[in-house]
Amino acid sequence: MPYLTIVLSGAYVEVRDAVPEVCRGGSIVVHHAAEEHADRFASDTRCLNGELPREGRVPSLRGVVVLDTELSRAVKSVIEAFYGRTDGLAESVKNLQTAVTEQSLEPPRERPEWLR
């Protein structure tokens, strides 16, 4: 099952394909189904995991995702609903799933020359 992690606070290092990546509070991390990875937590870190749809459009995003306005709103809505500040957790999660899938459909950004 593909899923995403919302890093609520703190930070941790995730290693995927032998490449470490720092995941800081306020970011989301997208995981594909059956993905192998390792997480290293060195300090107090709080995360919230949510499933992504199995059928339909599968998110092509992977790893730490830069939050645009739409994703930021969707993440905030899930967090507020999770902590009981608002109703509608299921609807908030569905909106977040849609936002991640929609961003996945955008053309990938050009890699800087120095990364090629």
Image (cartoon, rainbow, N blue to C red):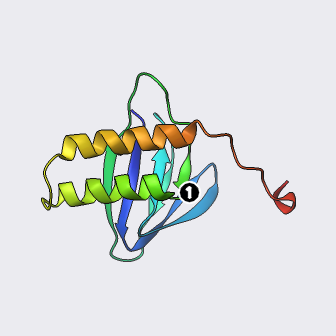
Horizontal and vertical percent for residue 1? 39, 32
Q: Position of residue 91 (x, y in %)?
A: 23, 41
Percent x, y for residue 50?
32, 45
Q: Which residue is mark 1?
A: 15
Dot 1 alpha-carbon crowd within 10 angstroms: few under 14, some 14 to 19, many 20 or more: some
Q: x, y (%) of residue 98?
A: 41, 38
Which residue does the image show at 44% across and 43% down from the upper left? 99
Towards the viewer: 54 or 109: 109
Q: Is residue 35 visible?
A: no
Relative horizontal placement of residue 18, taking residue 34 as reference (left or right): right
Check the image and name the residue furthest to the top: 55
Asked if residue 30 shows in the view, the reply is yes
The residue sitting at 16% across, 61% down in the picture is 83
Q: How many numbered marks, from 0 up?
A: 1
In the figure, residue 75 lies in which quadrant?
A: bottom left
Residue beneath the point at 44% across and 52% down: 70
